[in-house]
Image (tube, rainbow, N blue to C red):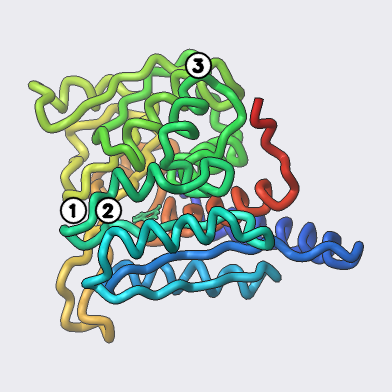
């Protein structure tokens, strides 16, 4: 019988921990952590994600600022806004919600963020520091997954870990973190992607399988071995007229089939998703406390 790796449950615990920490800061006369988000345009999913971030700030006693810019905002204006936030002293961290409109160079935008305020952990300075196991802001999704493994007592040392998907946001950093000589780490990592020849050959060898492909129910029961730990990062919206929203969320893993062979598995929704916003706020709290040694 499998055990659910519930991000919903763990995120509640972590939120409570942070809430108390912020209350203690404020009781001592300090200002609360302050997170800002820049949203360019009004993409539906991005609106939802940014909304979650602002709402969680409110719940935990963080200050938050939402900077809304029109979809046709020029790159120059966006870069100016970023510079302004870089300089703003009462702001601990900020993010620019991705994806950006096509006329804006996202790499240039990420590069413009002061790494010390880059609580998304997307700036090459943070990515490089992470790769060298130096203190850094970890990107929210991988950070959330690390905490799910850690707080559920899942041993990673010496395990065969297969990561499917090589995005800058999830697959690539996940592969680095799991291979690192760290408490959650010390895996033998295989990183699979769209050019991998025989995906099932690799996934069947996995003790720990992290799937971040964005293809609903792609991983089937015959592709995993008995006892596997499965982390499903997929959140594809599939039409469902019976729902008020008109859609429901599906993971990258065919849940019933794969769960039947798993020791641990994340559900979708309620698995990795709730951990990501919590992780962003953990980074912001770290920024507020000056916890990262930038040497
Ligand atoms: N779009 C999807 N995920 C993310 C994220 O973690 N951060 C930002 N800034 N944009 C995103």
Would you call the spot at circle 3 few (<14 residues within 10 Å), some (14-19), or many (20 or more)?
some
Would you call the spot at circle 1 few (<14 residues within 10 Å), some (14-19), or many (20 or more)?
some
- Of labels 1 and 2, earlier in sequence is 1
Quadrant assignment, res 173: top left
- Of labels 1 and 3, earlier in sequence is 3
Would you call the spot at circle 2 few (<14 residues within 10 Å), some (14-19), or many (20 or more)?
many
Is residue 37 at least partly visible in the picture?
yes
Residue 109: % across, % down: 34, 50
Is label 1 in a helix, a strand or a loop? loop
- Residue at left offset 48%, top offset 59%: 274
Quadrant assignment, res 45: bottom left
- Of labels 2 and 3, earlier in sequence is 3
Q: Is residue 31 left or right of residue 231?
A: right
171 is higher (above) or lower (below) than 99: above
Q: Residue tagged by mark 3?
A: 186
- Residue at left offset 22%, top offset 21%: 202
- Residue at left offset 37%, top offset 23%: 161
- Check residue 216 in the rendering and tell me which mark sits there, or answer none: 1
238 is higher (above) or lower (below) than 109: below
- The residues bearing labels 2 and 3 have C-alpha atoms spaced at a distance of 27 Å
| Labels 1 & 2 near each other (Cβ < 8 A) | yes
């Amino acid at each position: 019988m499998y055990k659910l790796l519930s991000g919903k449950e763990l995120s509640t615990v972590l939120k409570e921990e942070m809430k108390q920490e912020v209350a203690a800061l404020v009781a001592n006369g300090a200002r609360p952590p302050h997170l800002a988000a820049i949203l360019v345009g009004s993409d539906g999913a991005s609106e939802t994600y940014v909304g979650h971030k602002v709402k969680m700030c409110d719940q935990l006693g963080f200050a938050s600022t939402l900077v809304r810019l029109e979809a046709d905002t020029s790159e120059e204006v966006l870069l100016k806004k970023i510079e302004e936030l870089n300089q703003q002293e009462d702001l601990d961290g900020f993010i620019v919600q991705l994806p950006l409109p096509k006329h804006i160079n996202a790499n240039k935008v990420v590069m413009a963020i002061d790494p010390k305020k880059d609580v998304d952990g997307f700036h090459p300075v943070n990515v490089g520091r992470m790769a060298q196991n130096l203190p850094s802001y970890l990107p929210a999704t991988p950070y959330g997954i690390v905490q799910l493994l850690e707080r559920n007592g899942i041993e990673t040392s010496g395990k065969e870990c297969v990561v499917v998907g090589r995005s800058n946001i999830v697959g690539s950093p996940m592969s680095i973190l799991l291979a690192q000589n760290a408490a959650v780490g010390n895996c033998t990592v295989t990183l699979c992607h769209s050019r991998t020849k025989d995906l099932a050959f690799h996934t069947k060898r996995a003790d720990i399988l992290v799937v971040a492909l964005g293809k609903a129910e792609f991983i089937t029961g015959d592709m995993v071995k008995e006892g596997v730990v499965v982390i499903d990062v997929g959140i594809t919206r599939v039409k469902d007229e019976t729902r008020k929203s008109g859609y429901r969320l599906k993971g990258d893993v065919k849940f019933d089939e794969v769960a039947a062979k798993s020791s641990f598995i994340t559900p979708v929704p309620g698995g990795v998703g709730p951990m990501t916003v919590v992780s962003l706020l953990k980074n912001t709290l770290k920024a507020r406390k000056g916890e990262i040694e930038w040497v």
